[in-house]
Image (spheres, rainbow, N blue to C red):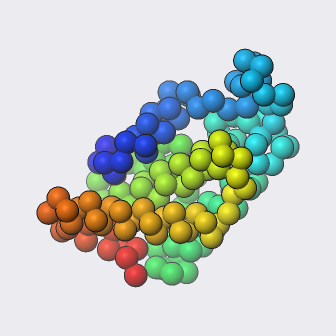
Amino acid sequence: YKTTKESKYHWLQFKILHRLIPTNIYLKKLKLTDSNLCTFCKLEAETIEHLFVDCPYVKEIWDAVEDMLLDRYNIPIALNKTNILFGKFNTCNTYKVENLLILIIKHYIFTCKYKSKKLNTDALLNVITERFYVEKYLLLRNGEYAQYEKKCDLLDN
């Protein structure tokens, strides 16, 4: 709740933490889908871990974000399965930005799954940029711009 005020990200993280994401394994048990294979790679059973971390197409997305942050902003970010699924715990502002990025990316992956869209790095980067502008607007509107500068100025170039 300290990372963002956006309820769609709270809702998604809650569902991940409580293992309530309807993956294809679960949907097949309910006979709502024909296959338990991953929506994106169709190689392995779709678990929460596979959907958000282990799928080769999803790994490409995480790698692209890590590369983008290093190339554009000189911010080295090391993501692993624990960080991706649960976030990074620390009070420093860099972790708040990283956690917001992680939430945005997980939401993008989740949205692509249920809209039957292919994962696209360029589209994701547009989503990230738009989300940071929204965060900036909300903090400006609420008179909390100093928080934005502390939290997001790293990525506002």
Which residue is more in the foreground, 141 or 107?
Answer: 141
Residue 94, picture quadrant: bottom left
Q: State the residue at coordinates (37%, 76%).
A: 156
**Quarter the C terminus occupies:** bottom left
In this view, 143 is above or below 117: below
Residue 140 left/right relative to 53:
left
Q: Position of residue 8 (x, y in %)?
A: 43, 43
| Residue placed furthest toward the top | 30
| Nearer to the camera, 79 or 113 | 113
Q: What is the x, y in percent for residue 21? A: 58, 32
State left or right for residue 3 relative to residue 8.
left
Q: Is residue 78 visible?
A: yes
Q: Position of residue 73 (x, y in %)?
A: 46, 79
Q: Quadrant of residue 79?
A: bottom right
Kindly identify the residue that appears in the image at 35 percent across and 62 percent down: 134
On the image, the x and y values in percent for residue 52 come to 63, 46
Query: Which residue lies at the image location 63% right of the left edge and 30% below the top edge?
Result: 22
Question: Residue visible at 21% across and 66% down?
Answer: 140
Whether 5 is drawn above or below 135: the answer is above
| Residue 94 is at least partly visible in this image | no
- Which quadrant would the N terminus be assigned to in this image? top left
Left or right: residue 121 versus residue 152 is right
Q: Is residue 23 above or below residue 77?
A: above
